[in-house]
Image: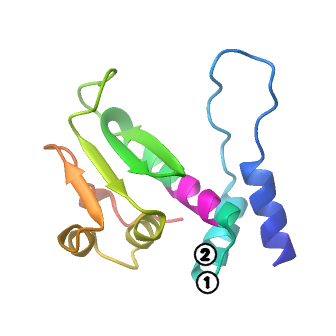
Amino acid sequence: MGEVLRCVRRAVAPEPAGSVDAMPPRRIETGDGRAALAAVSAGAAPRPATATAVRYLLQLLVEKAPGNSVEMRVPPFGAVQVIEGPRHTRGTPPNVVETDAATWIAVATGEEHWADAVTAGRIVASGVRADLSALLPLRP
């Protein structure tokens, strides 16, 4: 467990201050992401491990479906824009997906089907492009 926490701490450590410009998020290395997912799947993962697992899976989603037409939100851990199409820059985007961390991890890893989570109300998806089922599961 010590190695997992070391990987998680390294992955979620804040970037050093020094620039007023927004810095892109730190890339989570595959080993760190997989270690966080293993900790979460083992149960009772510390909050930093859950945060790293969520952000790692969001990172994989961005890599698989780059774009700016759908906003995928997993509060409080992260939000990304994915899928090619019209870019949205102000206000609430027309295509939004929001879910909790446990549901995101379950659908992103294939433990749960997208449609089942939507039907159960654990995923709220609005907009014509907000169905991410064709992109899931991700292969972490």
Find residue 15 and report its horizontal and vertical position in percent. 77, 35
**Left or right: 62, with 120 as reference point:** right
Find residue 91 and report its horizontal and vertical position in percent. 30, 25
Q: How far apart are the two marked residues, 2 and 1, measured between alpha carbons?
A: 5 Å
Find residue 62 and report its horizontal and vertical position in percent. 45, 44
Visible in this render: residue 131?
Answer: no
Residue hosting label 1: 43
**Left or right: 98, with 118 as reference point:** right
**Numbered badge on residue 137:** none
Visible in this render: residue 12?
Answer: yes
- For image coordinates 28% across by 32% down, the residue present is 92
Is 6 contained in the magenta span?
no
Residue hosting label 2: 40
Disc 1 residue crowd, few under 14, some 14–19, many 20+, Cα 10 Å = few
Q: Compare residues 134 and 86 and report the one nearer the observer.
A: 86
Is 54 contained in the magenta span?
yes
Q: Compare residues 28 and 80 and report the one nearer the observer.
A: 80
- Tally the marks: 2
Tell me if residue 49 comes above or below residue 116 in the rendering.
above
The residue stretch that appears in magenta: 50-57
Residue occupying the far top of the picture? 20
State the image quarter where residue 8 is shown: bottom right
